[in-house]
Image: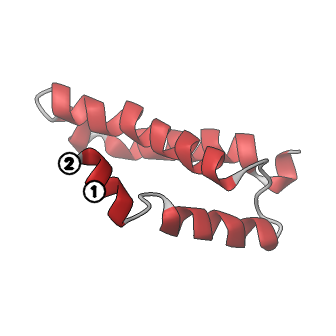
Amino acid sequence: MADQTRSQFEPHAAFIRWLNDAKADGALDFPAPELAARVFYGLVEGCLTWNALLTDGETLTTMDPILDEMIRVFLLAYAHDNK
């Protein structure tokens, strides 16, 4: 079932297009868009998804600092200005 679902769409396709546009605009710099997308989604899953699934949902009420930090970390790694 997982193989069939994955064959119907690319889960990171829209974000990869956005990443490529940001790189073309000079805002981001990364070696491979697929890798940068996987890193970002890894941050989301590790910081938000699993916490929300495995706790009483308290993480969902305090997401703003976590979201801000995830974006800060991602930009530290991939913002063109930081290279």
In the rendered structure, which amino acid carries the disc numbered 1?
Thr
Query: In front: 9, or 31?
Result: 9
Are there few (<14), some (14-19), or many (20+) residues within 10 Å of tag 2? few
Taking the image as shown, residue 42 lies to the left or right of residue 45, namely right
How far apart in space, not on screen, are marks 1 and 2 (Cα)? 6 Å
Estimate the x, y position of residue 41 in percent, counting from the top left. 47, 45
Estimate the x, y position of residue 76 in percent, counting from the top left. 72, 41
Say how many tags the image has.
Answer: 2
Query: In front: 34, or 43?
Result: 34
In the rendered structure, which amino acid carries the disc numbered 2?
Met
Residue at 62% across / 38% down in the picture?
A: 73
Residue found at the far top of this picture: 54
Give yes or no for contact between labels 1 and 2 (Cβ–Cβ under 8 Å): yes
Q: Quadrant of the C terminus?
A: top right
Q: Label 2, secondary structure: give it.
A: loop
* Residue 27 vertical position relative to residue 6 in the rendered view, above or below: below
Taking the image as shown, residue 18 lies to the left or right of residue 50, namely right
Estimate the x, y position of residue 22 in percent, counting from the top left. 71, 68
Residue found at the far right of this picture: 83
Query: In front: 56, or 30?
Result: 30
Taking the image as shown, residue 42 lies to the left or right of residue 19, namely left
Residue at 76% across / 52% down in the picture?
A: 79
The residue under label 1 is: 5
Residue at 57% across / 40% down in the picture?
A: 39
Estimate the x, y position of residue 21 in percent, counting from the top left. 70, 73
Taking the image as shown, residue 57 lies to the left or right of residue 59, namely left
Q: Which mark is residue 34?
A: none
Are there few (<14), some (14-19), or many (20+) residues within 10 Å of tag 1? few
The residue under label 2 is: 1
Query: In front: 62, or 48?
Result: 48
Q: Label 1, secondary structure: give it.
A: helix
Give the colour scheme of this rendering. secondary structure
